[in-house]
Amino acid sequence: MDIGRSLSFAFEDKKWVEKILIGGIVVFIPIIGWLLVYGYMVEVVRNVRRDEETLLPAWDGWGEKIGLGLKLFVVTLIWALPLIILSVPSSILSAVSEDAGGFLAICFSCVAFLYAIVLSLALPGITVKFAETGRISSGLEFSNILAFTRENLGEVIIAIIVIWLVSLMAGIVGGLLCGIGLLFTMFWATLVQGHLFGQIGRDKTSTSLDTVDASYDLSPDDVMPGVGELADETQAGAEEAVSEVTDVADSNVNASADVLDDGNEEESS
């Protein structure tokens, strides 16, 4: 794993100032901005895995980027459902003064903490697998993703540590730049994350992600009963929402392009 390249690759692009500037400004947009950034990161993962000459994607196809970001958010949310569900009884029991309630709260908290570690380690595999097809179902292939995580555990741990340190550094530097710089430094940290995930997934799809170890033959319901059905319903709703968001974004972009074309025609006439 080339950690140094993940830190510097963004600045090798001839238009890196423009692209990072747009990324930092996009973050200002509530909700949609971060969906765009997540979608952009997915494209970085794809470019790294394909060894593209230019790893920073162009800021075009906003509708597609929003769709990718929304789908990745849904995938991550479904994986995090057990953690969310476990946190509810833990919070309730911690408010109970009896010793039994406090003990049970600690038990739930410990289980939630262990699952949070598993989720953190699985995140590279989740992102890489989702980036392959851009389909929610690809990011929910629990067996393949857990097998991929196990086979690349060393690189995964290194990537998680580097991302944590880079995010910390980006927060400090961004804070020193009157707070506004935080938007740009955090966007850079997201690019580093995408590059590291792309490195882990490079040239490993044919083995790690497509070959399932029998010991990891898990379904969503094996993670927690009811999650499979909820995941299917969420996936169906998310696919419909993504389609609508993409259509709206693309129509807005086309409308803006038409306005510019009309303006250019008027000026030429």
Image: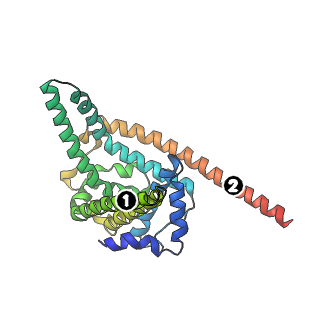
Name the side, left or right, on which 215 lies relative to 269. Answer: left
The residue depicted at 29 percent of the width and 42 percent of the height is 220
- Disc 1 or 2, which lies upstream in sequence? 1
On residue 256, which mark appears? 2
Residue 48 on image: x %, y %: 40, 69
Q: Quadrant of residue 89?
A: top left
| Closest to the observer, 171 or 152 | 171
Q: Amino acid at mark 1?
A: Ile
Q: Which residue is mark 1?
A: 172
Residue 144 on image: x %, y %: 28, 55
In the image, residue 107 sits, relative to residue 1, either above or below, namely above
Q: Amino acid at mark 2?
A: Ser
The residue depicted at 28 percent of the width and 52 percent of the height is 120
Name the side, left or right, on which 12 lies relative to 96. Answer: right
Label 2: which secondary element: helix
Q: Quadrant of the N terminus?
A: bottom left
| Closest to the observer, 66 or 205 | 66
Residue 124 on image: x %, y %: 32, 58
Residue 236 is at least partly visible in this image: yes
The residue depicted at 65 percent of the width and 50 percent of the height is 252
Name the side, left or right, on which 105 lies relative to 144. Answer: left
Residue 210 is at least partly visible in this image: no
In the image, residue 200 sits, relative to residue 135, either above or below, namely below
